[in-house]
Amino acid sequence: MAKALLGHIGGFDPRVLAEMRRLQQRVQDLETQLLRVQAENDALAAAARHGDSVLDSIDVSKAEPALT
């Protein structure tokens, strides 16, 4: 079975090796991008939990009524 998968006669096909290298590079690029996006998401989530919102600075007891 392995001989059939790898090519019984003549060894590896250079086109297959080139495609395999290209796909391995693509996987590595996607893993790098995933780590970057996860880090960005973690930073945004931490900022959202921190609560530096403009709405938090409003004192509701002294707020003026909305104009009608």
Image: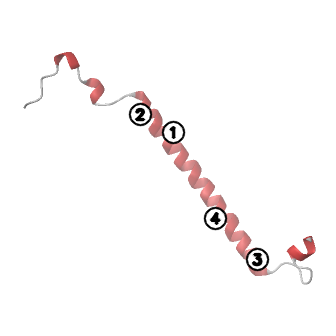
Rendered image: mark on residue 16: 3
Measured along the vertical axis of the image, is residue 31 above or below residue 64? below
Q: Quadrant of the C terminus?
A: top left
Q: Quote the CA–CA distance across marks 4 and 2.
A: 33 Å
Across and down, in percent, residue 19 comes to 71, 74
Q: Quote the CA–CA distance across marks 1 and 2.
A: 10 Å
Give the total number of marks visible in the rendering: 4
Residue type beneath disc 3: Val
Residue at 27 percent of width and 29 percent of height: 55
Residue at 48 percent of width and 38 percent of height: 43
Rendered image: mark on residue 42: 1
Q: Residue furthest bottom?
A: 10
Across and down, in percent, residue 49 comes to 43, 30
Residue 68 placement, left or right of 32? left
Residue type beneath disc 1: Asp
Instruction: Please rate how many residues cluster around mark 4, counting C-alpha atoms within 10 Å: few if below 14, some from 14 to 19, many from 20.
Output: few
Measured along the vertical axis of the image, is residue 48 above or below residue 14? above
Pointers 4 and 3 in contact (C-beta within 8 Å): no
Q: Quote the CA–CA distance across marks 4 and 3.
A: 15 Å
For mark 2, what is the residue?
48
Q: Mark 1 vs mark 4: which is more N-terminal?
A: 4
Q: Mark 2 vs mark 3: which is more N-terminal?
A: 3
Residue 31 sits in which quadrant?
bottom right
Residue type beneath disc 2: Ala
For mark 4, what is the residue?
26
Instruction: Please rate how many residues cluster around mark 2, counting C-alpha atoms within 10 Å: few if below 14, some from 14 to 19, many from 20.
Output: few
